[in-house]
Amino acid sequence: MSTTVETAAAKPAARVKRARADGSSVGPWLLAMPLTLVLGIFLVIPILMLIVVRFLDYNSVQILWSFVLDNYGQALSDPVTWETFAVTIKYAVITWAITLFLGFWLSYFLAFEVRGAAWQMGLFLVCSVPFLTSNIIRTISWIPALGRNGIVNSVLLHFHLIHQPLTFLLYSQFAIILAFVHLNTLFMVTPIFNSMMRIDRALIEAARDNGAGFWQTIFNVILPLSKTGIGIGTIFVITLVMGDFVSVSIMGGGQSASVGIMIQNEMSQLQYPAAAANAVILLAIVLVMVFLILRVVDIRKEL
Amino acid sequence: MSKKTTIDRRGLLKGAAAVAGTAIGSGAITGFPTIWAQNIKNVTLRQFGTGVSNLNDIATRCKADTGITISMTAMDTDAAAIRAITQPDSYDVADIEYFTVKKVFPTGRLQPLDIKKITYYDQIVPLFKDGKVTPTASVGQGTAPCRVSYTEGPESKKFAPGPTEWMTLIPTIYNADTLGIRPDLVGKPITHWKELVDPAFKGKAAIINIPGIGIMDAAMTIESLGMMKYGDKGNMTKPEIDKTIAFLIEQKKGGQFRAFWKSFEESVDLMASGEVVIQSMWSPAVTAVRSKGIPCTFQPLAEGYRGWGGGLGIARHLTGLERDAAYEYINWYLSGWTGAYLNRQGYYSAVLTTAQKYMTPNEWGYWMEGKAATAPIVSPQGQQIAKVGDKRDGGSYYDRIGHIACWNSVMDNDRYLIQKWNEFSVA
C-alpha cells in the first residue's frame, strides 16, 4: 500500500524530467508500461470492483445483481462500524507512539553510539533476525509466555511477586499492543536508521561547538533531519496495524475487534457487499492518514 | 478382520474384473459396470471439507482399497461454505455439513445423488431419512439433516419435505456436541448448560466464534437459566436474536469469557493450557486434550445436545467416469473402514452395521453401547484415551443421539444474526 503511494508520487516528476532530456516521447511511456499494467490489473481494477460490489444487494448465499445504497448506508450509520474503526485507530496510534519511541532510540544508538560501519550494519541485521520467521509464528509464540500458566506468570509466582496469575497478559488489549509493537518496530527502525546515517556528522559537531546540549541537539538537529525516516516508518506502521486481523484475533483471543476482523467475518459469511463497503471505508481512512503524513513530511526528499 | 477384508477388495479390483459375480457377493461395487473398475484407478478426485473428516489416513486407505486418488483440502466451516459456493469448479467432492448444504444446495453447485447407486443406502441410519433415531425420539430444532437430506429430482435445487430417490448429500458423519470441562479444575459437578456462565468460572469460560453455532450454545445456556424460551432455537426471530446477543455482550463485559475460539486447535490449546475450564467443544478436541494426559470431559447436560452432521456431495460439473468414481468412493466410504475410524474418534458413522465389522467388541461396547472398556481404548493415532473400566461420556449411542435438542443451523434471519454477532465481537 504505502510503496504504491510512494512510487506513484515519485514517478511523474522523474518521467517528465527524462522525457525532456532525450526529446523522445515513446521511450518513457514504454518504461512506465509494466508498472502501469501491474498497478492497473492488481490495484486499480480490484478497487473498482470493490466499489461496485459494495452497491450490490445480497442474501445469505450470494450477491444479487441489483443496485442498492443500503450496504454503504448501513455500514456508515451503524455505531458498531464506528466503534470498530475507533478501536482499530486506537491500536494504530498507540502502536505508532511506542514503535516511534523505540525506533528512534534504537536508530539513534545504532547511528551515533555504535562506532564503525561494520558494527552498525551487523547490529542492524541482528534487529532483523526475528523477521526470518512468519508474522503468525512470532505472534503465536507469545501465548505460552503470557498465559495463565505461562512463563511470565510462573516466574512471578515463583518469586512471590504476585499471588494470583495475571490474566490481563494474554487475550487482552495489552497483548494485542505488545504483539503489534513486536511485529512492527523494525519497520520504524529501518527508515529512521537510514535517515540518521545520512546526517552529516559535522552538523552535530557544529551544534556542540555552538553550545547545544544533548537534548537540544536531538530536538533541533537530529529530529528534523530524521523526519523523512519517521514519516516512512509511520506510514508502514499505520497501514500494517490498520489492516491487521491475525494478530488481533490471536492475541485478543477472539474477544477484540478490528476492521480487518470485521471484514473477514463478513467475507466468511459470504457477505461480500458489506465487506466491500467496509474495505472501501478503511481504504479511504488510511489514504487520508497517509495524505496527512505526506503533508507533514516530504518523503521524496529521501528517495 | 479388517486386514482380511482389504485383501479381498483389493484383489477384486486388480484381477477379478471378469468375475462380476464375486463383486456382488462382497457388496463392494454392486451397481457398477465392472469395466470401470480398471479405469477408476487413474481417477483423481479433489475433495475439500472441514478438518473433522479430511484426514490423510482416509485418502491413503481409499487409494489402497479402490485405486482412486483423493486429494484433500481441509478448511474451517465458514471457508468450506465459501469454497462450495464461489469456486464450484475447484472441487469434485464436497465434504460439508448439513447446515452448510442448506446454503449451498439452492445455488445449484451440487448435483442430486441417486440413492439407487448407493450400496448401503438401506443401512444408513434413519436420522438422515425421517430424522428419528428411535421411533419415539423427536427431531431436534434447527437444520436437522432430515430437513435438507432430499431433493425433488435429478435436476432440482429444492429440498423435498420427505424421502425421495435423490439426496443432497450422502451422510457420513455426525455427532452430539456439548460443553467440554476440565473435571480437575471446575471443582463441582456440572449438570446444566447454565454453568457456562456460572460466576465461579469468571474469566475461565469460552465459546465458539462461529455465529450459527455459537448462538446455539448461547441459546441453550439462556434456556437453561430460564430467562427465555425460544420458539425455534434453530430459526430465531429478530427479537430473540437481539436478546441472545444482549445476553452474550453482558457476559462478555462482565469478564465471563477468556476467549472465543474458531478452530479446533485453538479449543484444544485453551483447554489443555488451563486458560479455560468450561467451553463449547467438539468431541475429537476432547479426545486430543485427553491424549495429552490431561483430564477432560465431554459433559452430558440435562437440556440435551447440540447436533451436527456432514456428508459427501458431488459437484454439478462431474460426469461420466469421474462421477462413477465419486459414487464408488462414497460407497467405499460407507463400507466400514472409515466408519470405524470416525467412530474411534468419538463421532458416529452414517452406516453403523458396516463400521461394527471393523471394530473390536470392546471398542464397539465403549463407543457405541456405553459399556465399560474391557481393554484400553486407543485413538486411531495409537494414543490411549481410556483405560479399563472407563465409560464414554454421555453413554450409549441412543443416550447421546437421542437427546439432541437442536442442530447447527442457518436461520432465515441469517444476515441479521451476522450483523448482531459483529456487535458482540466489538463489544
Image (cartoon, rainbow, N blue to C red):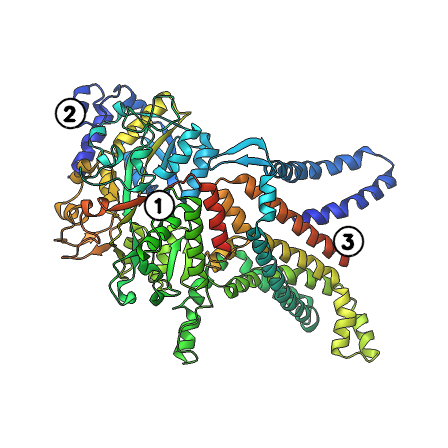
The amino acid type found where label 2 is placed reads Gly
The answer to whether residue B418 is seen in the rendering is: yes
Reply above or below: A303 against B188.
above
Report x, y in % for residue A200. 79, 67
Please name the residue that numbered disc 2 is placed on.
B25
* Lateral position of residue A184 relative to residue B387, left or right: right
Q: CA distance from mark 2 to mark 3?
A: 80 Å
Report x, y in % for residue A155. 42, 75
Question: Badge 1, how many Cα within 10 Å: few under 14, some, many 20+?
Answer: many
The amino acid type found where label 1 is placed reads Lys
Please name the residue that numbered disc 1 is placed on.
B233
Whether discs 2 and 3 lie on one chain: the answer is no
Report x, y in % for residue A104. 67, 67
* Lateral position of residue B226 relative to residue A244, left or right: left
Q: CA distance from mark 1 to mark 3?
A: 60 Å
Reply above or below: A212 against B22.
below
* Lateral position of residue B54 relative to residue B34, left or right: right
Look at the image and tell me in which quarter the N terminus of chain B lies.
Answer: top left
Please name the residue that numbered disc 3 is placed on.
A300
Please tell me in which quadrant of the rendered image residue B234 appears.
top left
The answer to whether residue A125 is seen in the rendering is: no
- Secondary structure state at the residue bearing disc 1: loop
Q: Are marks 2 and 3 in contact (CB under 8 Å)?
A: no
Report x, y in % for residue B402. 21, 44
